[in-house]
Amino acid sequence: MGRLIEVCANSVESAVKAQEGGAYRVELCAGIPEGGTTPSYGEIAVARKLLTHTRLHVIIRPRGGDFLYSPLEEEIMAHDIDMATRLGADGVVIGCLKADGSIDTDMAGRLLEHVGKGMSVTFHRAFDMCRDPMGALEQIVGLGIDRILTSGQEATAEQGIPLLRQLVERAAGRIVIMPGCGVNAGNIEKIARETGAGEFHLSARSSIGSGMVYRNRRVSMGGTVCIDEYSRDVTDPAKVRAVL
């Protein structure tokens, strides 16, 4: 099939723009400033309706922060996987760790029981927070998961090339290693050449200004978290095409 591009879509609008740009797959997320959280029922349903030739994966992550989840959070994730399955998602993106930095294979195994037949599963960047990447790789392979999204445990995938190369070699075709974080048209050729990876994860977003004329600058919806509430980032089809 050749090299494949997955776009991290922060909205249905971004998912549609990713499809327009030629992305093979989107990972639909909410809460991008927190690293991605589970999108709403409505987001998944409308994305599924509009993505006619781009595959739809849904991140299953109940909150930002670490990947050490409580039994209550596990129950929430199980219901969210059920929802994504019912709505026709092509796959889900999961990840959970134990306090010692190893993969929580017991919890992951229970979550996998909720994944619909024929759906694909990605282990997300919780992998980048694990203690022993090679041991974690073997644990995830043992779970039967299809791919690992990783920056090579560095701030960007380009910086993580040495570990990404080792992971691709160790995986030996048993699981897909998908570099992500900071992947763009300027570095994807280098990352592909130096790691041997065949799937890549990127955002490819541009900022769009708000249509609001009246703006009350005294109030922030994020309270102490200051963000620009009069612009939003949306996937840019031109950036996706440039990467391809």
Image (cartoon, rainbow, N blue to C red):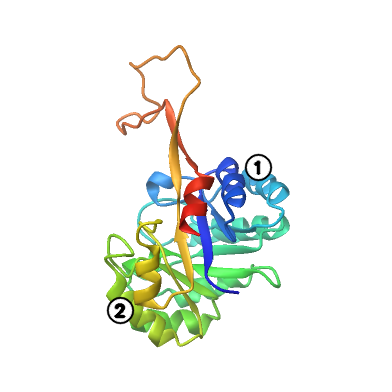
Can you see residue 100? no
**In the image, residue 221 above or below residue 77:** above
Dot 1 crowding, Cα within 10 Å, few <14, some 14–19, many 20+:
few
In percent of width and height, residue 196 lies at: 41, 78
Amino acid beneath label 1: Gly
In percent of width and height, residue 165 lies at: 34, 79
The residue that label 2 is drawn on is 132
In percent of width and height, residue 188 lies at: 39, 63
User: At numbered mark 2, what does the secondary structure look like: helix, strand or loop?
Assistant: loop
Q: What is the distance, in whole Å, between disc 1 and disc 2 at their CAs? A: 38 Å
Can you see residue 124? yes
Decide which of 190, 228 is in the foreground and name it: 190
Give the residue drawn at x 56%, y 73%.
2
User: At numbered mark 1, what does the secondary structure look like: helix, strand or loop?
Assistant: helix
Give the residue drawn at x 35%, y 68%.
190
Decide which of 31, 208 is in the foreground and name it: 208
**In the image, residue 169 above or below residue 8:** below
Dot 2 crowding, Cα within 10 Å, few <14, some 14–19, many 20+:
few
Decide which of 40, 162 is in the foreground and name it: 162
Amino acid beneath label 2: Asp
The residue that label 1 is drawn on is 42
Residue 202's label in the rendered image is none
Residue contact between numbered discs 1 and 2, judged by CB atoms under 8 Å: no
Q: Quadrant of residue 233?
A: top left
Give the residue drawn at x 64%, y 46%.
41
* 50 sits to left or right of 22: right
Disc count in the image?
A: 2
In percent of width and height, residue 152 lies at: 33, 70
Q: Earlier in the sequence, mark 1 or mark 2?
A: 1
Decide which of 41, 9 is in the foreground and name it: 9
Picture quarter with the N terminus: bottom right
